[in-house]
Image: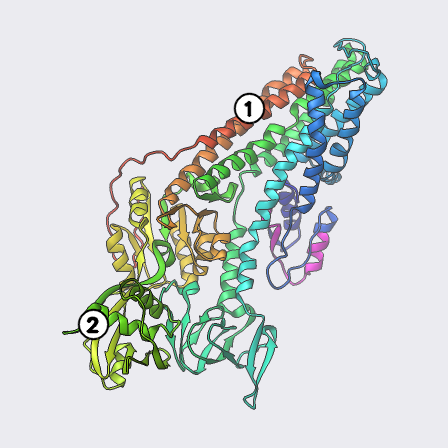
């Protein structure tokens, strides 16, 4: 498919089949079809193929990547040959005897080979008695070249040393405009390449999901022996082994062992979850502790990871593109122009020679060539996204700018988005007679032997305050509880209150809110406790405040506990809070907010946010997050402040997207206005083909210059706005306009 008109045509054709309901998505090059059993998939494929397109049945896994290499090669040829054509045609100082023949030779591969995608699409459209923007591009390029070649061969202008002239009534048109065909193809190939790149990225999120899964799994057979088998061979009920550091192959229940599992990609929980016999685990999560034996409960398409993948696919299928406006208009505009050109030629044949009639008709075709229309969106996107990159805002494309101006609600993930996603020591409470340095020193000496995130946070804190650590001997870890070692000749225990109690050491009950508490004892005597927690980013509070000041409603949406969410919300200020939600529930919450009439932007960083990012009207990911979240989003925040992602860039991203959309709308207005004015003038014979080419170039230049204004875009100051009323935990407040 080459434009939205192609997608619409295929969709209408499929929907004419009895019992079939089809939705064709141009951005992802897929058709979602509901069909009765009496209509096999082969018939659906045959229907699409009969229309001149290609199709294949669905297959497991993400669709293969669609590269833009063929377009790059065509664009490279077009640019290489068009540059000298434009210079020779427009700069008299460099022209030499016979330059016209050189220009004709250089233009041929541009119009013929580089422009073939447009010609092919025009032929397909013609077979079905339809037209699109490709039809005008093809006709404009071919007619301009054919006319110029005829003028070069059939008039004295083609002979060296003879000056070209123009006579409106009588005689032949001696003007050459090879540069029109070359420039038209080159400029529109640039737009087509930008579009292809966006389409390629559309499937990257699903490919990222596939990369999370393991390819091989260690299965225990009936004799208890281990054997490595492909993941596809794993069946429900099979026992498989997960070693420390490995991803869990599929959803299951722990049968043997205890460990900590990093499930942040699914739950948003910053601290690894302790699991033991009977605990459920999810495929794709990482075992960061001891060895586990897991019994598979769901495999293949039934796993939670696969379900998230389907959610991302469904959400992306509904994305719209502003480019469809130009294609939909072209579906009516192109036949209209062709009728006008033919009517013009017929009318002029009555009062003027054939050459004059052909010249006027050619002028109509050339002046109507939608170069400005084709450039209106991609040039604004190119400049706008380039400016965004300078400001640390990566805006993906038209789908982002299309909805940004309507955003009224901004939903934030917590862990890794509003917070750093990394644990740090937040409190050190030594027992009586023990100082903080001593407590940290002994705890860190033991934890230095562990890879647990809480342990690493303690080691980092001790490194800042204690210097070098003593050596630890006879280290022993109890998965899910704690660890112990001999330090300076004394037995030191570090871990949960239960871990120390099991070893006969009484420790006080501690309420540290959302922080993880680690107790420390030496030779049976408590030394105190240390708390570690995930902290807010420095820019989190200013970012939420700035969005509220801009009149937007912030929402905190997290898979973390209600207590952790409440603690964060208290620091952020008035904000809606929805806690303890699964990735599926996150996407469902976004749908619920949209059903209430809100236009929602989602800001997230993890794999657990991917479906919600794709489901939102506008997905915003932080650059330090997972590749899947970034690929499922429309905007990525990479601007840093004090070494961390600057969340205030979210407000700037919305402002830049709105400015880009305004620019696209102005471009489209002038492109349509140009055609509305110039087509009647050309039909009346007041515009020569050369002037038509110049006018078309000027309209394109106007679009480009207007787009370049975005390169000077600056975030506007945001006026203060009343803060929304706080709401109860877990409640979604009604929309207020």
Question: Is 47 drawn above or below residue 498 in the view shown?
Answer: above
x then y, percent, for residue 331: 64, 34
Q: Disc 1 on helix, strand or loop? A: helix
| Residue pointed to by mark 1 | 702
537 and 514: which is toward the camera:
537
x then y, percent, for residue 94: 71, 19
Which contiguous range is marked in magenta?
25-47
Image-based side of 543 in relation to 223, left or right: left
Name the outermost residue toward the left: 432
Q: Is residue 496 magenta?
A: no
Residue 729 appears in view: no
- Which comes sooner in the sequence, label 2 or label 1? 2
| Residue pointed to by mark 2 | 510
The CA distance from mark 2 to mark 1 is: 68 Å
482 and 179: which is toward the camera:
482
592 and 205: which is toward the camera:
205
721 and 42: which is toward the camera:
721
* Quadrant of image for the N terminus: top right
Name the residue at 38% across, 74% down: 450
């Amino acid at each position: 498919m080459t434009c939205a008109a192609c997608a619409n045509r295929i969709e209408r054709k499929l929907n004419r089949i009895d019992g079939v309901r089809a939705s064709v998505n141009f951005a992802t090059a897929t058709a979602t079809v509901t069909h009765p059993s009496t209509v096999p998939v082969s018939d659906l494929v045959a229907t699409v193929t009969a229309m001149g397109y290609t199709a294949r049945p669905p297959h497991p896994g993400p669709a293969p990547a669609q590269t833009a290499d063929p377009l790059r090669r065509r664009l490279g040829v077009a640019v290489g040959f068009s540059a000298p054509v434009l210079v020779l045609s427009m700069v008299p100082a460099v022209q030499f005897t016979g330059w016209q023949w050189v220009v004709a030779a250089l233009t041929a591969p541009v119009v013929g080979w580089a422009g073939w995608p447009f010609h092919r699409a025009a032929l397909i459209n013609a077979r079905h008695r339809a037209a699109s923007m490709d039809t005008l591009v093809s006709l404009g390029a071919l007619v301009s070249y054919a006319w110029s070649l005829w003028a070069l061969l059939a008039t004295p202008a083609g002979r060296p040393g003879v000056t070209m002239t123009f006579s409106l009534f009588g005689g032949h048109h001696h003007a050459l405009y090879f540069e029109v065909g070359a420039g038209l193809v080159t400029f529109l190939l640039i737009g087509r390449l930008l579009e292809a790149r966006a389409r390629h990225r559309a499937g990257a999120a699903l490919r990222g999901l596939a990369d999370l899964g393991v390819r091989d799994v260690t299965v225990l057979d009936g004799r208890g022996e281990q054997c490595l088998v492909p993941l596809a061979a794993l069946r429900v009920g099979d026992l498989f082994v997960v070693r420390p550091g490995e991803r869990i192959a599929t959803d299951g229940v722990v049968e043997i062992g205890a460990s900590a599992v990093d499930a942040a990609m699914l739950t948003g929980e910053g601290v690894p979850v302790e699991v033991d016999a009977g605990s459920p685990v999810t495929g794709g999560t990482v075992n960061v502790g001891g060895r586990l034996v897991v019994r598979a409960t769901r495999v293949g398409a039934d796993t939670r990871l696969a379900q998230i993948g389907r959610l991302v696919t469904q959400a992306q299928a509904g994305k719209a593109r502003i480019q469809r406006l130009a294609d939909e208009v072209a579906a009516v505009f192109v036949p209209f122009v062709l009728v006008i050109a033919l009517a013009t030629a017929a009318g002029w044949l009555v009062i003027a020679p054939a050459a004059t009639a052909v010249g006027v008709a050619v002028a109509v075709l050339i002046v109507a060539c939608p170069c400005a229309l084709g450039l209106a969106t991609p040039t604004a996107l190119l400049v706008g996204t380039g400016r965004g990159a300078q400001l640390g805002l990566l805006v993906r494309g038209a789908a982002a700018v299309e909805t940004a101006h309507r955003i009224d609600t901004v939903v934030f993930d917590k862990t890794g988005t509003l917070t750093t996603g990394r644990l740090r020591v937040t409190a050190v409470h030594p027992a009586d007679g023990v100082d903080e340095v001593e407590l940290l020193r002994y705890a860190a000496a033991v934890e230095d032997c562990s890879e647990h995130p809480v342990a690493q946070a303690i080691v980092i804190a001790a490194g800042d305050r204690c210097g070098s650590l003593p050596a630890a001997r006879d280290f022993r870890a109890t998965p899910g509880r704690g660890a112990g070692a001999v330090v300076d000749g004394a037995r030191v225990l570090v871990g949960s209150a239960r871990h120390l109690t099991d070893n006969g050491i009484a420790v006080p009950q501690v309420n540290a809110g959302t922080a993880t508490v680690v107790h420390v004892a030496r030779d049976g005597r408590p030394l105190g406790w240390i708390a570690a927690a995930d902290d807010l980013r420095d820019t989190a509070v200013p970012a939420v405040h700035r969005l509220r000041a801009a009149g937007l409603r912030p929402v905190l949406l997290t898979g973390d506990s209600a207590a952790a969410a409440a603690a964060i919300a208290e620091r952020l200020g008035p904000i809606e809070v929805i806690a303890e939600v699964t990735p599926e529930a996150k996407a469902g919450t976004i749908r619920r907010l949209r059903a209430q009439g809100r236009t929602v932007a989602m800001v997230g960083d993890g794999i657990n946010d991917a479906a919600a990012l794709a489901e939102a009207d506008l997905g915003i990911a932080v650059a330090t997050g997972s590749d899947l979240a970034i690929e499922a989003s429309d905007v990525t925040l990479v601007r840093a402040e004090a070494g961390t992602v600057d969340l205030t860039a979210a407000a700037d991203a919305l402002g830049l997207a709105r400015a880009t959309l305004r620019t696209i709308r102005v471009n489209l207005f002038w492109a349509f206005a140009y055609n509305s004015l110039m087509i009647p003038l050309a039909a009346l014979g007041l515009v020569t083909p050369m002037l038509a080419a110049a006018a078309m170039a000027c309209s394109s230049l106007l679009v480009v210059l207007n787009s370049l204004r975005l390169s000077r875009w600056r975030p506007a100051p945001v006026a203060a706005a009343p803060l929304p009323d706080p709401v109860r935990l877990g409640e979604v407040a009604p929309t207020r306009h």
